[in-house]
Image (tube, rainbow, N blue to C red):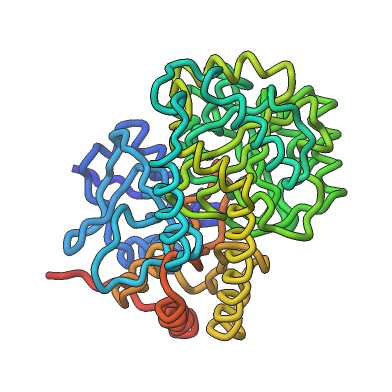
């Protein structure tokens, strides 16, 4: 039987992507059946006359597309059956592993103390509506008014009637997508974007289109072209530091994006879970284009993880749609959590913890500067993470595996890639997911791996 092999004469730059495309077509055409073992990387590299690292990147790309999977000690196999995407972070913390993969705020005893005190107060003075009412309009008018006050600190001037209180940012994002893009339509977002947006769009029947980015974020001209090519209905954008590359979009760039959105009649979904923690930032898109921007913010990244409350501010034309979609998906936010969030906004606890978090983040960035000295990385003084492009010789999957073998978990850059555009090997490193000593140790290990010559992952035989 003839064994299928890629055609070296048709390989184009970037070669790894071209090779991955050839193998993907063979899988789609049924030439490579599910479970077929792909050639050993070095053997295929010799046959094609290319570097073994190029074959490794091609196999990584196939794994990212859900078309292949490596098995320790056996090799790489076709996996053409539809599979759920892997999260970039560890689903659970493992003993003796420094987990820098999951994005979370820095937490110390002050956070547990504040929550214990809030629960004690709530136990003595819980509003009857918070535990006895089924009607959101009975429970939440006061919370919406408090939310409008908080949103003013984020740069918005919005009526309480235009605010929906949600169980965090993810439900707010879901409502915003459902309100602006019907099933079957296309939504644009950054080419390196929100990792949960990819499966969410799929579950909602939406086509997600990656828009090219630069050092400021989404490129307006690329968005304009995508509107023509894909008939976009809305755009999901993260202009303020929370995006994987930790970039802060300038006011001029924001204005240019708004101009495209107005010309093409796009709805804008602005994801801003860091809210007021970023001190010197341009006005939000929702202030520049209040008639078309749905604004999302929350407390779990800036106050504490367990405060699962978010705010969705929407223009008048989306108020009814957002309310209905919230009702049918979640009915309403958890009233007891909303009570805590509202009381903390009103008495200043929320801003106290935001200021605490900002100082703690600045300290963590000092640790990063020392540990990654001489290594090019992207960050912002108030970001909860750094983005580290890897040297060309390093394969992303192998690097992440090597770091894991050395006791450090980091997030692979491919987890944040939207669309098919090539992405240079990179990793995201979170700064708040462990204590300062472990962060310093984990970063030192990452720096060592970057400076060292890449080693292939050893297979257990």
Indicate the position of residue 144 as horizontal and vertical percent values: 63, 30
Image coordinates of residue 329 in percent, x first then y, are 44, 21
Depth check: 80 or 311 in front?
311
Q: In which quarter of the image is the N terminus?
A: top left
Q: Is residue 228 visible?
A: no
Q: Position of residue 198 (x, y in %)?
A: 49, 38
Q: Residue at 39% of width from left, 56% of height from top?
A: 89
**Figure check: 266 above or below 283:** above
Q: Position of residue 10 (x, y in %)?
A: 51, 48
* Residue under the image location 69 percent in, 22 percent down: 161
Which of 240 and 41 lies nearest the eye of the viewer?
Answer: 240
Q: Is residue 334 above or below residue 428?
A: above
Q: Is residue 99 above or below residue 75?
A: below
Q: Residue at x 46, y 81 (%)?
A: 440
Identity of the residue furthest to the front in this view = 124
Residue at the location (43% across, 17% down)? 134
Within the image, what quadrant is residue 215 found in? bottom right
Q: Quadrant of residue 402?
A: bottom left
Q: Tell me where residue 39 sits by quadrant.
A: bottom left
Quadrant for the C terminus in the image: bottom left
Q: How many marks?
A: 0
The residue lying furthest to the left in this view is 461
Of residues 104 and 457, the one nearer the viewer is 104
In the image: residue 313, left or right of residue 337: right
Asked whether residue 241 is in view, the answer is yes
């Amino acid at each position: 039987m003839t064994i299928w092999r890629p055609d070296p004469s048709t390989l184009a730059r970037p070669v790894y992507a071209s090779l991955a495309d050839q193998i993907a077509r063979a899988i789609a055409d049924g030439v490579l059946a599910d479970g077929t073992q792909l050639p050993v990387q070095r053997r295929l590299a010799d046959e094609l006359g290319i570097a073994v690292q190029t074959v490794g990147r091609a196999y990584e790309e196939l794994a990212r597309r859900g078309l292949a999977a490596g098995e320790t000690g056996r090799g790489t196999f076709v996996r053409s059956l539809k599979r759920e995407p892997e999260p970039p972070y560890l689903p659970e913390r493992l003993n003796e592993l420094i987990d820098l993969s999951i994005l979370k705020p820095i937490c110390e005893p002050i956070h547990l103390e504040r929550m214990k005190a809030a629960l004690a107060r709530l136990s003595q003075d819980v509003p009857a509506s918070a535990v006895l009412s089924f009607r959101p309009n009975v429970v939440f008018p006061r919370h919406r008014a408090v939310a409008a006050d908080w949103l003013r600190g984020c740069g918005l001037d919005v009526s309480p009637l235009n605010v929906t209180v949600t169980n965090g940012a993810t439900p707010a994002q879901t409502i915003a997508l459902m309100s602006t893009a019907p099933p079957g339509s296309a939504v644009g977002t950054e080419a390196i974007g929100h990792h949960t947006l990819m499966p969410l769009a799929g579950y909602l029947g939406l086509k997600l289109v990656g828009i090219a980015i630069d050092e400021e974020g989404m490129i307006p001209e690329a968005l304009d072209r995508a509107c023509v090519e894909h008939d976009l209905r809305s755009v999901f954008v993260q202009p303020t530091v929370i995006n994987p590359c930790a970039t802060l979009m300038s006011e001029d760039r924001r204005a240019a994006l708004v101009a495209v959105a107005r010309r093409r009649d796009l709805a804008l979904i602005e994801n801003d879970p860091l809210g007021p923690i970023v001190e010197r930032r341009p006005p939000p898109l929702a202030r520049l284009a209040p008639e078309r921007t749905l604004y999302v913010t929350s407390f779990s990244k800036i106050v504490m993880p367990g405060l699962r409350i978010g705010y969705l501010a929407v223009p008048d034309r989306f108020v009814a749609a957002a309310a209905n979609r919230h009702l049918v998906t979640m009915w309403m936010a958890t009233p007891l959590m909303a009570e805590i969030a509202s009381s903390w906004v009103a008495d200043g606890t929320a801003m106290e913890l935001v200021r605490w978090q900002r100082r703690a983040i600045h300290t963590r960035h000092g640790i990063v500067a020392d540990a990654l000295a001489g290594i090019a990385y992207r960050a912002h003084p108030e970001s909860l993470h750094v983005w580290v492009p890897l040297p060309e010789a390093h394969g992303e999957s192998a690097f992440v595996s090597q770091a894991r073998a050395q006791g450090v978990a980091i997030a692979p850059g491919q987890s944040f890639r939207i669309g098919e555009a090539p992405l240079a090997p990179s990793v995201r490193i979170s700064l708040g997911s462990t204590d300062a000593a472990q962060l310093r140790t984990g970063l030192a290990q990452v720096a060592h791996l970057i400076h060292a010559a890449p080693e292939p992952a050893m297979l257990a035989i």
